[in-house]
Image: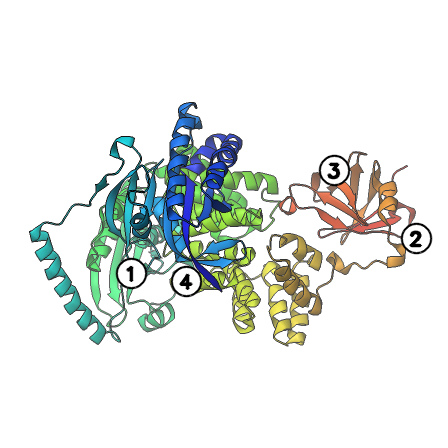
């Protein structure tokens, strides 16, 4: 591993998502204009090396930190001049961070704390401004025509030791000045000394008691019981539980177990020892909700899992219109009972209701309940309910965020009967962007965008979005699993594994789709025991969903359990009526950055007996058409025939320019058709917009109406050209 000392400059666009929402194409054009006309010339002039762009970010390395600072200053000064000529809505501002530190070199790329500190400094800079580290300041002071304002030592996220930070003063009138941070008063020094002594004493006690006292409080909010006589009120009761989980998860000094793990206890008797063992928590919140007409009654209590003592309990009898006020009081009182002191921002966020429109909130809760089933019919219902909630309150950020998450699930699962791929993709980006415009500190929209971006092969941007999701939702298992998914497909297996382990600490009972992701991570790390465990949990957590059966086969195959692998493939094919195939896996996972990762999956599935094509189709290579023959047989023709497995009629109309339409009893697709090598390819908005290619064979012994057979990842089409 090569290391070296380097000056690192990181720049990032301020409010890029908001600018893109207003004018996506124009924003991208202006970014690239700044990159090529401003950054690249200045970098070259100051002897720097552009390492890479990361979405809307730029990473540059310099041999001299003086050159790095001078380059940053020139960029910001010239950028201010360029902005002056633009309309306000077209102006793009950058933040810049500069650090001098140790970096790890891998090929043309660099990373490590030297880069991470520069990134954290960039986030501290003002729009159009620059922040530098103390190491950079020590080497640049009085060597550039700028001044500096000391911000003191800052504890930067994920950086072990505090870092001295300086803001660069770009006003020419302040050149040469060094404005020191305020000196603490004598009384403050005395208080700080006393505080240090108290902390030291507490630390000694803490170490002595370490085997018995958890590092920080941890809590599981169990599903509140629905005491209403109407089971249809479950959505409302579950919504109260989820809101309390979300509020408590905002608190920086508290670990909160996620939804999937706690809802495994729904309807089960309270056994504190089991909960303490399975979830690893010190405290449990349990309660009940009764909704009668326009009145609600909520009972809740906080229990110590070790002793069984009730540390706090309360009852709320209110009108249904006060439901959000009740949720606010619950969160604040539980935090107080746990001895937590809320920061101003935490108190404000808990106090602020997600919406003032109760009807919109009701639609939102119903939509969330429908989404969690994962069933196609309920997902279609959920999207319609989200639409109603958003129409009633266009400022309801959580509704837009949940909508984006549900739609991304539809898109990622290729549920085209719920929403066509192109429409789903567009909806995800629109809803996630809207959520962030309304509430920039929501983590889930960043997690959703990260998954979308990695499937689109925008790897650096995806990693950045996922890291932002984790930064904003440090206890959000969904955010950590989004990071795991992104790192996995980007080829960063160790980082993906670390993200999975973190997610499991916050939600030991992950959802089926997240268990599937965890299984893939462990599989590519060659930890087949953990891969098998997670694939089994994914299968068992989604009974009747064949998507989570076949993956188990590849882990069995690598573990040497070939009989189990082949039996699992047979079971998976039965669930999906024979539609699964290597071709399907190849196209749906084509966004693996490292081709060898996908090959390692396909080879194991092939060994386990998964067929190359759907419905186990096999053609005779002697009957296979070559490129010119395929072109002659299909281009500019109307193809009439039937599809497997039902033999239902189907038509494919292909114009000479490749514009085409395919219609069957279950599908109506407009697409582009072309011949590539000895394959006939279809490309539409389905299959993530990827070309779906397959061979064409003569069917010499078939009836005249099916003289050819064409197969790809989704269909077997027997046809003849219509004369």
At a point 39% along the width and 55% down the height, the residue shown is 114
Q: CA distance from mark 2 to mark 3?
A: 26 Å
Residue 502 is labelled as 4
Distance from disc 2 to disc 1, alpha carbons, whole Å, reads 70 Å
Alpha-carbon span between mark 3 and mark 4: 47 Å
Residue ID at (21%, 41%): 179
Q: Position of residue 643 (x, y in %)?
A: 78, 49
Q: Are marks 4 and 2 in contact (CB under 8 Å)?
A: no
Compute the Cα span from label 4 to label 2.
58 Å
Question: Is residue 540 positioned above or below 646 on the image?
Answer: below
* Tag 3 and tag 1, C-beta contact below 8 Å: no
Q: Indicate which disc residue 285 carries.
A: 1
Residue identified by numbered label 2: 700
The tag earlier along the polypeptide, 4 or 1, is 1
Neighbor class of circle 3 (other Cα within 10 Å; few <14, some 14-19, many 20+) is some
The residues bearing labels 4 and 1 have C-alpha atoms spaced at a distance of 23 Å
Q: Secondary structure at mark 4?
A: helix
Rendering coords of residue 517 (x, y %): 53, 60
Give the residue pinned by disc 3. 661
Looking at the image, which residue is at 44% across and 48% down? 62
Q: Nearer the viewer, mark 4 or mark 2?
A: 4
Q: Is residue 409 visible?
A: no
| Res 523 visible | yes
Q: Secondary structure at mark 3?
A: strand
State the image coordinates of residue 612 (x, y, percent, origin top left). Answer: 74, 60
Label 2 Cα crowd, 10 Å radius (few <14 / some 14-19 / many 20+): few
Is 482 or 188 nearer to us in this picture? 188
In front of the other: 265 or 70: 70
Disc 3/disc 1 C-alpha distance (Å)? 56 Å
Q: Earlier in the sequence, mark 3 or mark 1?
A: 1
Mark 4 residue crowding within 10 angstroms, few (<14) / some (14–19) / many (20+): some
């Amino acid at each position: 591993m090569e290391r070296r000392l380097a000056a690192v400059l990181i720049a990032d666009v301020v409010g890029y998502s908001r600018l893109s929402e207003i004018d996506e194409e124009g924003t991208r054009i202006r970014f690239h204009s700044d990159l090529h006309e401003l950054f690249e010339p200045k970098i070259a002039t100051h002897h720097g090396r552009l390492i890479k762009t990361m979405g809307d970010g730029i990473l540059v390395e310099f041999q001299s930190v003086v050159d790095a600072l001078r380059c940053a200053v020139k960029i910001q000064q010239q950028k201010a001049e360029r902005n002056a000529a633009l309309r306000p809505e077209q102006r793009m501002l950058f933040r810049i961070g500069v650090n001098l530190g140790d970096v790890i070199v891998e090929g043309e790329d660099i990373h490590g704390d030297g880069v991470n500190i520069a990134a954290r400094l960039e986030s501290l800079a003002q729009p159009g401004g620059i922040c530098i580290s103390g190491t950079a300041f020590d080497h640049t002071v009085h060597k550039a025509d700028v001044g500096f304002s000391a911000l003191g030592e800052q504890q930067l996220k994920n950086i072990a030791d505090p870092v001295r930070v300086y803001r660069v003063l770009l006003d020419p009138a302040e050149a040469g000045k060094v404005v020191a941070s305020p000196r603490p008063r004598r009384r403050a020094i005395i208080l700080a000394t006393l505080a240090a002594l108290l902390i030291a004493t507490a630390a000694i006690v803490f170490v002595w008691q370490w085997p018995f006292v958890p590092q920080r409080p941890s809590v599981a909010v169990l599903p509140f019981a629905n005491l209403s006589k109407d089971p249809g009120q479950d959505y409302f009761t579950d919504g109260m539980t989820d809101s309390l989980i979300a509020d408590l998860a905002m608190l920086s000094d508290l670990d909160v177990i996620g939804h999937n793990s706690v809802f495994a206890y729904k309807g089960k008797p309270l056994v504190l020892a089991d909960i303490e063992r399975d979830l690893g928590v010190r405290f449990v919140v349990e309660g009940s909700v009764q909704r009668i007409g326009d009145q609600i009654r909520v009972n809740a209590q906080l229990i110590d899992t070790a002793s069984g003592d009730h540390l706090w309990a309360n009852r709320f009898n209110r009108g249904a219109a006060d439901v959000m006020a009740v949720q606010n009081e619950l969160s604040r009182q539980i935090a107080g009972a746990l001895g937590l002191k809320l920061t101003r921002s935490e108190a404000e966020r808990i106090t602020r209701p997600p919406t003032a429109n109760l009807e919109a909130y009701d639609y939102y809760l119903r939509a969330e309940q429908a989404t969690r089933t994962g069933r196609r019919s309920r997902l279609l219902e959920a999207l319609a309910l989200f639409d109603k909630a958003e129409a009633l309150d266009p400022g309801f950020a959580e509704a837009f965020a949940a909508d984006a998450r549900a739609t991304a699930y539809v898109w990622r699962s290729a549920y085209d009967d719920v929403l066509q791929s192109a429409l789903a993709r567009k909806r995800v980006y629109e809803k996630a962007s809207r959520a962030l415009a309304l509430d920039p500190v929501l983590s889930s929209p960043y997690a959703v965008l990260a998954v979308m971006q990695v499937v689109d092969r925008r790897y650096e941007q995806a990693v950045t979005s996922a890291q932002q999701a984790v930064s904003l939702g440090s206890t959000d298992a969904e955010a950590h699993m989004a990071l795991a998914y992104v790192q996995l497909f980007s080829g960063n297996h160790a980082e993906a594994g670390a993200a999975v382990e973190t997610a499991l600490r916050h939600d030991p009972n992950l959802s089926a789709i997240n268990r599937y992701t965890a299984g893939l991570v462990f599989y590519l790390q060659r930890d087949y025991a953990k891969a098998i465990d997670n694939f089994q949990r994914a299968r068992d957590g989604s009974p009747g969903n064949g998507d989570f059966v076949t993956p188990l086969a590849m882990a069995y195959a690598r573990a040497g359990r070939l009989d189990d692998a082949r039996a699992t493939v047979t079971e998976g094919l039965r669930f999906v009526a024979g539609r699964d195939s290597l071709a399907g896996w190849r196209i749906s996972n084509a966004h693996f950055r490292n081709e060898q990762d996908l090959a390692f999956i396909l080879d194991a599935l092939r060994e386990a007996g998964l067929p190359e094509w759907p419905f186990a189709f096999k053609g005779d290579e002697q009957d296979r058409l070559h490129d010119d023959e395929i072109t002659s047989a299909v281009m500019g023709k109307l193809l009439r025939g039937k599809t497997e497995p039902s033999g239902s009629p189907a038509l494919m109309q292909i114009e000479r320019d490749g514009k085409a339409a395919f219609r069957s009893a279950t599908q109506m697709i407009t697409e582009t058709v072309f011949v590539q090598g000895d394959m006939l390819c279809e490309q539409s908005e389905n299959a993530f917009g990827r070309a779906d290619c397959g061979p064409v064979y003569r069917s010499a012994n078939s009836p005249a109406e099916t003289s050819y057979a064409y197969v790809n990842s989704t269909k077997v089409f027997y046809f003849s050209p219509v004369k």
